[in-house]
C-alpha cells in the first residue's frame, strides 16, 4: 500500500470547460509526471502513511507541471479542507482572516485546512510574515506554488518552516501520455488528428508544459474542424502534418521570465559558456534569451563586463569589441542587433581567457579594506604649491622615461606594503607578451616580491 494507490475516478466530463480543466486528475493514479514525488519511498508517502502531519510545502517548478493539482490531491488524500488563493489579489488582511478562520474551523469541526497560495513569490515580506504564526500553530498547512527560486523570493523565516519540493518539466514520454488521454476526452484517435511527426513536434512546442500541450491540442482540433468545414468534409478527413502546424507556431513563446528563475539560469549558462570558450553553446543561449524577450542592452552590458572580467589582457581588443557591440545594439535595435550580439558573443567565447586583471582588482580592494588609507609616499605627492614643496612633497621622484627601458626602480606603495604584487599576468594570449615585457623592463624575474 502507498499514498498513490489508484481510486476509481469519474469519467471525462463532456462539457465546454477547457481541455486542461476537464482532464485535471481526480486521484494520484491519473497524475502525470513527478514520479520522484509519487514513489512509495518518497518523504510525503512515508509521512502520511506513518500518520505524521503534512509539512508546509513550497512547490517550485515551471508552469504546467501539476503544482496546483498536486496540492488539491494532497488535500483529498488527507481529507482536509482546501482553500486556494492567488498571491496577486491576496493582501495581509485576507491572509490573517483565512488564518483565524482556519483556527476556528479546526477547533470547532476538527478538520485541518490546506491553504494553497499560487504564485506565492508575489507576496511581499510583510504578507509572508503574516503566515508565520498560523503555520507554527498548525492552524493551516501552507502549500505555496512558485515558478521562481524560493531562495530569492521568500524570506528566510517562512522558508525555514517549509519543505521545498522541486517540480520538473514533463518529459516527451509524459507529454505523449497526456496527449493520448486528451484524444480519449475529445473522442478521436491520435492518428486522425496528427501524423506521428506532427504529434512529436507538438510535444516539443509544449516545452514540458502539460497545460500548454492540452491548449495546443485544442487549437489543433479547432483548426482541423475549421479546415474540414471549409471543404464540407468531416473533421476526420486527414490528420494534420508539420506544415499545418506552422499557423500555430506564431502564437507560441518560449518559457522565459525576464524577472524570474529562468532569466537567471539562462544568463548564467550564457556567461559560463562564453567563459568556457564554447561559442556554439554561447550563441545558443543568446538565441534563447532573445527569443524569450530579454533586453538586448542587458546582454550587451553583460558582455562588456565579461570582456574585462574573463578575457582581460589575454586579448585587450575584447573590451573594444564588446563596447562597440553595445553601441551597435543601441544604434540598430532588434532584430538586426542580434547579429551584433552574435559577433561579440562568438568573439569573446573564442578569445584567450585571463581573469588576472580582475583578480588584481579584487585583491587590491581587499588590501585597502585591510590596511586602510596609509600615507602616500612623499615623492609621489602633488607638489603644485610652494607649501607642498616646502613640506618635501615630490622630492626624490624619478621620471620613468629617463630610465634605459622606460622604467626606474622606485617605491610606489605606501610604507609597509613595499613589494606587494597584485597583478600577475598569465601565460595566455597577449598577456604572455605583457608578462615577458614586464620581466624584461623591470627584471621582475630576479626581483623578490610578496603576495597579498
Image: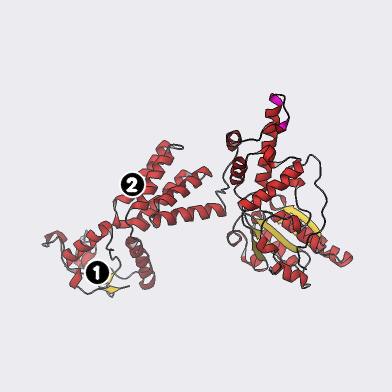
Name the residue tied to disc 2: 321
Kindly indicate the quadrant of the structure image that contains residue 144.
bottom right
Between the C-alphas of marks 2 and 1, the distance is 38 Å
Q: Residues within 10 Å of mark 1 (few under 14, many from 20)?
A: some
Taking the image as drawn, is residue 397 in sight? no
1 vs 328, left or right, is: right
Give the percent coordinates (x, y) of residue 233. Answer: 72, 27
Residue 246: x %, y % from top left: 58, 35
142 up-or-down from 19: above or below = below
Q: State left or right for residue 371 relative to residue 210.
A: left
Could you tell me which residue is drawn at 81 percent across and 40 percent down? 15
Numbered disc in front, either 2 or 1: 2
Q: Secondary structure at mark 1?
A: loop
Quick one: 14 or 150, which is closer to the camera? 14
Q: Residue at x 73, y 66 (%)?
A: 135
Q: How is the image coloured?
A: secondary structure
Q: Position of residue 109 (x, y in %)?
A: 88, 64
Residue 360 x %, y % = 33, 64
Q: Is residue 245 visible?
A: yes
Q: What segment is highlighted magenta in the picture?
A: 229-235
Residue for badge 1: 377
In the image shown, does 28 or 444 lie closer to the viewer?
Answer: 28
Q: Residue furthest right?
A: 108
Q: Nearer the viewer, residue 426 or 452?
A: 426
Residue 428 shown in magenta = no
Q: Quadrant of the N terminus?
A: bottom right
Point out the residue furthest to the top here. Answer: 231
The mark that comes first in sequence, 2 or 1, is 2
Amino acid at each position: 500500500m502507498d499514498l498513490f494507490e489508484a481510486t476509481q475516478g469519474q469519467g471525462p466530463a463532456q462539457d465546454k470547460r477547457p481541455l486542461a480543466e476537464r482532464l485535471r486528475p481526480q486521484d494520484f493514479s491519473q497524475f502525470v509526471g513527478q514520479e520522484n514525488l509519487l514513489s512509495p519511498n518518497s518523504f510525503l508517502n512515508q509521512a502520511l502513511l506513518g500518520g505524521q502531519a503534512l509539512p508546509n510545502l513550497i512547490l517550485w517548478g515551471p508552469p504546467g507541471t501539476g503544482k496546483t493539482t498536486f496540492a488539491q490531491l494532497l488535500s483529498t488524500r488527507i481529507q482536509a479542507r482546501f482553500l486556494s488563493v492567488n498571491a496577486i489579489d491576496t493582501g495581509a488582511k485576507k491572509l490573517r482572516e483565512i488564518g483565524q478562520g482556519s483556527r476556528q474551523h479546526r477547533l470547532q469541526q476538527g478538520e485541518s485546512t490546506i491553504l494553497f497560495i499560487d504564485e506565492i513569490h508575489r507576496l511581499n515580506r510583510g504578507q509572508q510574515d503574516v503566515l508565520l504564526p498560523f503555520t507554527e500553530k498548525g492552524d493551516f498547512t501552507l502549500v505555496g506554488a512558485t515558478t521562481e527560486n524560493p531562495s530569492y523570493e521568500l524570506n528566510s523565516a517562512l522558508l525555514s518552516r517549509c519543505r521545498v519540493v522541486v517540480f520538473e518539466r514533463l518529459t516527451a514520454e509524459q507529454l505523449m501520455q497526456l496527449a493520448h488521454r486528451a484524444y480519449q476526452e475529445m473522442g478521436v484517435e491520435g492518428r486522425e488528428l496528427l501524423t506521428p511527426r506532427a504529434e512529436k513536434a507538438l510535444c516539443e512546442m509544449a516545452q514540458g508544459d502539460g497545460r500548454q500541450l492540452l491548449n495546443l491540442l485544442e487549437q489543433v482540433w479547432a483548426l482541423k474542424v475549421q479546415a474540414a468545414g471549409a471543404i464540407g468534409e468531416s473533421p476526420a478527413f486527414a490528420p494534420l502534418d508539420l506544415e499545418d502546424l506552422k499557423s500555430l507556431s506564431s502564437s507560441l513563446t518560449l518559457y522565459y521570465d525576464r524577472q524570474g528563475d529562468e532569466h537567471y539560469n539562462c544568463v548564467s549558462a550564457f556567461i559560463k559558456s562564453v567563459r568556457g570558450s564554447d561559442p556554439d553553446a554561447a550563441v545558443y543561449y543568446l538565441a534563447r534569451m532573445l527569443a524569450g524577450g530579454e533586453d538586448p542592452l542587458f546582454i550587451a552590458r553583460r558582455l562588456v563586463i565579461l570582456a574585462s572580467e574573463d578575457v582581460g589582457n589575454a586579448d585587450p581588443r575584447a573590451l573594444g569589441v564588446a563596447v562597440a557591440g553595445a553601441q551597435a545594439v543601441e544604434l540598430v535595435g532588434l532584430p538586426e542587433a542580434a547579429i551584433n550580439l552574435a559577433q561579440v558573443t562568438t568573439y569573446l567565447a573564442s578569445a584567450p581567457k585571463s581573469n588576472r586583471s580582475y583578480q588584481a582588482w579584487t585583491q587590491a580592494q581587499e588590501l585597502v579594506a585591510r590596511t586602510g588609507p596609509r600615507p602616500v609616499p612623499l615623492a609621489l605627492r602633488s607638489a603644485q604649491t610652494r607649501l607642498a614643496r616646502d613640506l618635501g612633497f615630490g622630492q626624490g621622484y624619478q621620471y620613468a622615461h629617463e630610465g634605459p627601458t622606460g622604467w626606474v626602480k622606485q617605491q610606489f606603495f605606501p610604507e609597509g606594503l613595499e613589494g606587494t604584487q597584485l597583478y600577475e599576468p598569465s601565460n595566455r594570449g597577449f598577456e604572455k607578451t605583457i608578462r615577458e615585457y614586464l620581466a624584461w623592463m623591470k627584471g621582475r624575474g630576479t626581483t623578490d616580491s610578496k603576495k597579498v
